Amino acid sequence: MSPAALTLAAAHRPESPGLWTLAWRRFLRDRLGAGCLAIVVVFVAVALASAAGLIASDWSHETAVSYAPPNFLGGSTAPDEASPTAVRDDVSEEIDIKDPLADELAEIRKALAGRSAVETKKATLPLGADKWGRDVLLKLAKGTETSLLVGLSAALLATFLGTLFGAQAGYFGGRIDDFFNWLYSVLTSIPYLLLILAIAAVLNQKGTSTVVLILGLTGWTGIFRLVRAEYLKHKVREYVLAAGAIGASDTRRMFAHILPNVSHVVLVQLSLHVVLFIKSEVILSFLGFGVGVETVSWGSMLNEAQAELLIGKWWQLAAATAAMAVLVTAFSLFTDALRDALDPRLR
Amino acid sequence: MSLQTERAETLLDIRDLTVDFRIDRATTLRAVRNVSFDVAENETVALVGESGSGKSVTALAILGLLPENASVGGATLFIGRDLFAMPRRELQRLRGRDISIVFQEPMSSLNPVFSVGFQLVEVLKQHASLRPRDARARAVDLLREVGIPEPAAKVRAYPFELSGGQQQRVMIAMAIACEPKLLIADEPTTALDVTVQKQILELIAELQARRRMSVLFITHDLALVAEVADRVVVMRDGEVREQGPVRQVYEAPADAYTKALLACRPRLTNRPVRLPVIDDFLNPGREEHPPLELPERSRGLRGDEDVILEARHLAKSFYRREGLIGKHEERAVKDASFKLARGKTLGLVGESGSGKTTLALMLVRLQQATRGEVLLEGVDLLSVRSDSIEHKRRIQIVFQNPYASLNPRFTAGQILMEPMHIHGIGETQTGRRELAYAMFEKVGLPADAFFKYPHEFSGGQRQRIAIARCLTMRPDILICDESVSALDVSVQAQLLNLLQDLQDEFGMSYLFISHDLAVVKYMSDEIMVMTEGEVVEIADSDEIYARPRHPYTRKLLAALPNALLEPGA
């Protein structure tokens, strides 16, 4: 071909829809899936804004009275007028023990005296307040950041491990396959909660990264099994043989040839595990192995809510549950639509 | 085959059949348009066409088995009653009792978890309302009738215990169980070996004569038709191109497409320098030679040719675990020795399971040989480290299935540039791109193929990409493992011409593997016959067809459709 024709062909690059483009078009045709994607995007935007400090950076400020009800209840439940300090003083006098912190408290009270007079605590908030008067709406935004971070990074970790191990086991077979299958069997034969508690005990520190590690290190097994099966199926396909015939190395065949062809499985598993791990984080926090006290997540909100519910303060529970239910449902439906769109019906 | 000249009563009458498929809201695809033909009682009609001609859709429409998104027009009269107007229940009763069908793939048509006897009895109970004991006895009779050895024992066998040919016999037994008036056979022999194909064809002809039923025989292979049919209907792109008595269509085809189909299939009698293709007939006058008057190409070895590849006592065994420590040896290739001359073609013929693909995979080192040596210009390939890519470059392979051998996530350009990248061919990315464009031109693909994905190409075009991928490495030896077998006859002719042109230009040596003896004879200088892992005969290609020595070679040649032995139309 002449150079002129070559440049013409190169300049005249036709818009040829790749498989990803086709999948994206199929995805957009599914209205429900596209709607769910929009919801997920909103949650992610909130989480990003919160992480960047644009919103909810002051979530821990006690801006309202304790258990301030949501706006739409219109403050009908009058805030408790009795001040907690007064109560405490009464108690100490009654049992006639001198409060060892009395001096310090008196000093703090004196220092704060001027400010607390100026600062008026709100009686109601859009979604109410918790025991300390912190805004539930802000906590929810901050909690979205934590929960999404935990869900996404744990799912990424689990998917990475599952894909890597599954690819090795399925592609090479033999001893390597035996080893990973043994590891898989051992991990899956331990009851899930026991395993989580064991790893939590070994790591022995609380925090977001610990939760991510716990979930990621225990959660890869299902992905491993699926990816291994896909690799077993694909390694004997003719296009992989053809790649071998032109001299492509094992690594190249595994990751440049087969991986893109099984990526629909990996992607769908990734998003399924995001949902799973958001729920798991709630359970872990509820059990006390979750994120630290200095951060807030949906799990820790639910954890606080169990005591609140007994005295009829239901709004924190409702807010956290609603946020979680909406995100999990949207993410699941999004995942379903994604799976349908990515299913490579290759002729 | 009946030879009556006066036609009997019409059994099936198809009038202006039209089938549309709804793809989505905006697009419908017309798969069959205004097709009319009829099938008389006790007559075999062959419906011939290439893929996409609408022949299978027509058969499914007759049976009312089209998917939900299809809509039919026209009328199909079966003994005077319109099948399309018939209530569902009645149509279901008719299917299996009066009209039955045999599909292409016996393995996927039989349920693997039930014995064949059970499946036959099911059919008999449903349609003939026999008592279980009578049904069982009848099942044994049917198996005997379709030529299954030891029918009383085989009635308890599961599908996987039978060979492909026997499975197809069971399918036929199920189809004739209720003595249908019309048997539709949809490519019943395409998935089978040539020798088995012959037996199944004979069986169908025999049953047709004995039971005085009508057969609608659907096939892509015009050569087969002459053996079985009384009348032929040729279809293309959903339309009937020509219909008539088999002799007339064969000896004096009226339609250009029919002529082309007859001409582009390689024959045993002659070997033109290039095969005629459909275009020669549909747009005549572009070539300097009329397609049917091409000079002959001479083949064969003189005996003093330079040997480029030699295999000595090559063997491959697979081991299957049995119990804890035992293993079972399965010898796929027992002992293969042969020489491949430089610039020549060695044909390899054998049926499925003969070890020919294993042999090819050993040569490109995708399978490790158990014993033996492969000498490439005197260097033993099997002792070279398996990751030495220089030797890999010199022997390349084109696989059978063009739909599976290209990575669907790579563009055609990436597919071509990958081997250049691995082997360091073409200094820069631009240089490689230019080479890729040159290769596309060489194999007859447009330049914009560079940016397209495999799914945007037809089967023939994909096989061209696979060939171009091999060419980028300038191999000395090209192995074609059934590379044209999955393609339509007309596309096959184009690819055979392409392969021949490339050999003439680059002087490559070919190992040409196929189960199709006519194609192998057309392409090869020398032919090697394999069966059950052993090479039983090697000889010059004209010699082996004229004077086959080994009994297996004779059996293979006897199984060829007679039409291929006659000179072209």
Image (tube, coloured by chain):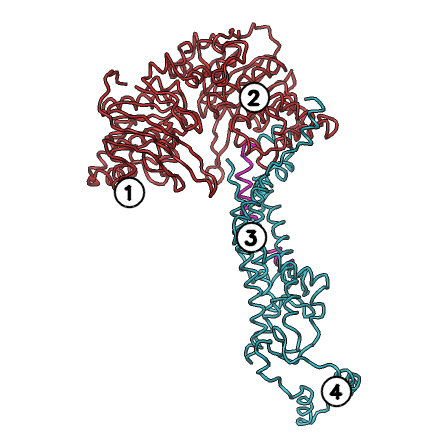
Chain colours: A cyan, B red
- Pick whichever, A345 or B60, lies toward us: B60
Q: Which amino acid, by three-letter code, is at mark 4?
A: Pro
Q: Are marks 3 and 1 on the same chain?
A: no
* 3 and 4 marks in contact (CB < 8 Å): no
Specify the label residue B479 is tagged with.
2
Mark 3, residue position:
A34
The residue sitting at 61% across, 34% down in the picture is B411
Reply above or below: A73 against B338: below
Q: Nearer the viewer, mark 2 or mark 4?
A: 2
Instruction: Answer with the quarter of the image where residue B33 lies.
Output: top left
Q: Which amino acid, by three-letter code, is at mark 2?
A: Ile
Residue A145 in percent (x, y) is at 66, 62
Mark 1, residue position:
B88
Q: Nearer the viewer, mark 4 or mark 1?
A: 1
Q: Nearer the viewer, mark 2 or mark 3?
A: 3
Q: Which amino acid, by three-letter code, is at mark 1?
A: Arg
Specify the label residue A100 is tagged with.
4
What is the distance, in whole Å, between disc 2 and disc 1 at their CAs?
A: 52 Å
Crowding at dot 1, Cα within 10 Å, few <14 / some 14-19 / many 20+, comes out as few
- Pick whichever, B325 or A61, lies toward us: A61
The chain containing the residue under callout 1 comes to: B
- In the image, which residues are magenta? A212-239
- Pick whichever, B384 or B96, lies toward us: B96
Q: Earlier in the sequence, mark 2 or mark 1?
A: 1
Q: Are marks 2 and 3 on the same chain?
A: no
Tag 3, which secondary structure?
helix
The chain containing the residue under callout 4 comes to: A
The residue sitting at 46% across, 37% down in the picture is B322
Membership of B155 in magenta stretch: no
